[in-house]
Amino acid sequence: MRSRMRWSLSLMRTRGRRCVGRWRRTGSGRDARRTKSRESSRGLRDGLEGGIAERSHRILRVGAGSASFRDMSGKSPDAIRTDCRYYRGDRPCFPGWICTPECERFGPVGKRVLLIKTAALGDVLRTTPLLRTLPDHLGPCQITWVTDSGALPLLNGLAEIDRALATTDPALPFLLDAETFDLAICLDKEPSACALLARANSRDKRGFTLAPHGAVIPANRSADYLWRLGLDDDEKFHRNERSYPELMHHAIGVPYGGERYILSVSEAAKENARDRLDACGLVAGERVVVGFQTGAGGVFANKAWTVTGVKEAIIATASDLGATPVLLGGPREAAQNRMLAEDTSHLGTIDAGADHDLETFAAIVGSMDIVVTGDTLAMHLGIAQGRYVVAIFGPTCAREIDLFGHGRKIVTALDCSPCYRRTCDISPSCMEKIEAAEVVTAIQDGIAGRTDDASSTPKDHDTGKRA
């Protein structure tokens, strides 16, 4: 009994892959017991290794409509395709589906691309043309997009994105450390975003990164111009003639052919928008609907058109053009829009409300025939959904915005524009110099040039190129 216990304890010690046991008793039975111990050791070892191999090399296989197991020792044609873009790891890619090389849904991963674009919501939208041009340039791509959590609704439903991650996701640093990308892109000049690119595992980094001393610098030579554009006001404000999508593509060395923004608005959001507009008294298809986005972000001074200008344009739109004005905005514009709606209620002006989530707001903008706005999110949402956009510019650069031939830019005549100032004491201001008559003329042109939505609105998955 004692020797057997010593064997059991000793068996747990290993040398390489051989189990080693020693008998310490001596006498006439020593050789027999040693032989017995070697046979026991070999049998136990072979049994353990065989069992582990059998369990490790079995996978599910489709057979006559049911799942079965088969041995996969060595190379097997039935290996699970972890190189499929739809592979999820913890569950089937589609309910009830079983992974086989013959799977009709198999999609090659191709190039693994990391795209970092956070910042303003409009900037996120105008980066979406890359979702078309990158696969055109690189072939099949698996795209991971990192953005602020507030921008995720703009990326939901886009089949071109394989994974959207928020910068606030606690797993993000670990994923960047563990994964490798064929191409990593950062189009923000914020240090926090550039640090993500610096951290990413990729031999091909483009856009902007963070230097060891904490400065934002170009990650590749082609990004030098876009980098310098932010450092040279004269170049940005007066010399540059290219739109942001053109600048962005040049910075990362990808050809650009006028591809449009991509946005997918869910049916639920569209239904919410219809319910809200119906409750406000809007009758679909009865008259041309003109949306007025009355506010703008508070970062730059005078980015929104004046309340006086908006009111004059609303009166002319309803009285002279026979269209229905709809007031658009968020919480910042709620009180202002209520006042405008009350003052022009006799003209049938509708206040669409100011308490919408982002996707519902996008659907409301998409319900307009024409959108009148400053350089705002509503402008980008209108562009993305093929609306006729009358875009009014004061302190920001009209040149960087592409309406894709479906709208009109109205730019202030003030010499100091654009300026991107956060405060301004000039009177009259750049937006006060915009005349309502000019805006109304642009609206009239939009009404005259309207075509059926089916031909004028870019679909979610069309070529998306400028007409």
Image: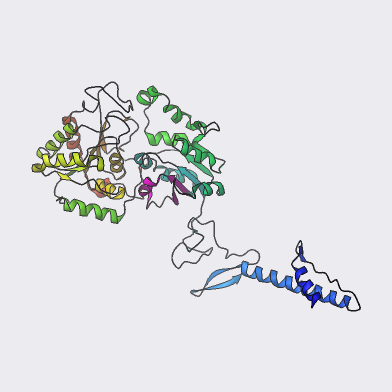
Q: Which of 108 and 54 is in front in this view?
A: 54
The image quadrant that residue 371 belongs to is top left
Instruction: Kindly identify the residue that appears in the image at 23 percent across and 28 percent down.
Output: 431
| Residue 449 coordinates in the image, percent (x, y) | 20, 40
The image quadrant that residue 344 belongs to is top left
Farthest residue in the right direction? 28
Instruction: Kindly identify the residue that appears in the image at 79 percent across and 67 percent down.
Output: 20
| Residue 369 coordinates in the image, percent (x, y) | 21, 44
- Does 15 sit above or below residue 208? below
- Does 31 sit above or below residue 220? below
The image quadrant that residue 387 belongs to is top left
User: Which quadrant of the figure contains the N terminus?
Assistant: bottom right
| Residue 228 coordinates in the image, percent (x, y) | 45, 27
Give yes or no for residue 154 being in the magenta stretch. Answer: yes
Q: Which of 425 and 395 is in front in this view?
A: 425
Picture mark count: 0
Colouring rule applied to residues: rainbow
| Residue 71 coordinates in the image, percent (x, y) | 62, 70
**Magenta span covers which residues?**
143-166
Farthest residue in the front direction? 2
Residue 180 visible (yes or no):
no
Q: Viewed as shown, does residue 324 lie left or right of 296?
A: left
Q: Viewed as shown, does residue 400 lie left or right of 105?
A: left
User: Which quadrant of the figure contains the C terminus?
Assistant: top left
Farthest residue in the top direction? 415
Give yes or no for residue 186 being in the magenta stretch. Answer: no
Residue 11 visible (yes or no):
yes
